[in-house]
Amino acid sequence: QVHIVQSGGGLVQPGGSLRLSCAASGFPSDYYAIGWFRQAPGKEREGIACITSRPEAPVYADSVQGRFTIFKDNANDTMYLQMDSLRPDDTAVYYCAADTTSLLFRLCVPRFYVYWGQGAQVTVSS
């Protein structure tokens, strides 16, 4: 059983930075995908940054490319999302989620992710 615990979030000013953490364990094999999703009020949940376990190939949504970075600390079974140059339209609830396969066509597609963190509010406002 995959277990996910995420931390981080909060209020930040436009142009600021924030880091989210996701501790994930219990994967049935060494091949899986994990990523970050967000949902703003009135909008659908979207995948913004995801990474496969082997190889560690990250993908990003166009809206965050060049501003957000996803990376893993395998020694501690933890994944991070470093968010820089934050904008008001980044305001949303952010979720960490995991897929027990590393199939590329599923990467960052919310309906394929079965295991979800509890979510964290990120608000970008002055």
Image: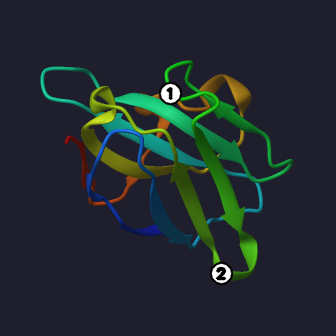
Kindly identify the amino acid type of the residue bearing the numbered disc 1.
Answer: Val
Q: Which mark is residue 109?
A: 1
Q: CA distance from mark 1 to mark 2?
A: 25 Å
Left or right side of 5 for 124: left
Residue for point 64% across, 31% down: 66
Q: Secondary structure at mark 2?
A: helix
Q: Quadrant of the C terminus?
A: top left
> Picture quarter containing residue 37?
top left
Q: Which residue is mark 2?
A: 76
Front tag of 1 and 2: 2
Q: Which mark is residue 54?
A: none
Which residue is at the front of the view, 89 or 51?
A: 89
Q: Are marks 1 and 2 in contact (CB under 8 Å)?
A: no
Left or right side of 104 for 89: left
Which residue is at the front of the view, 33 or 78?
A: 78
Left or right side of 22 for 31: right
Kindly identify the amino acid type of the residue bearing the numbered disc 2.
Answer: Asn
124, above or below 42, in the image = below
Q: Position of residue 123 (x, y in %)?
A: 22, 45
Please tell me how crowded label 2 is: few (under 14), some (14-19), or many (20+) other residues with Cα within 10 Å: few
Q: Position of residue 117 (x, y in %)?
A: 35, 59
Residue farthest left in this picture: 42
One can see residue 33 in this view: no
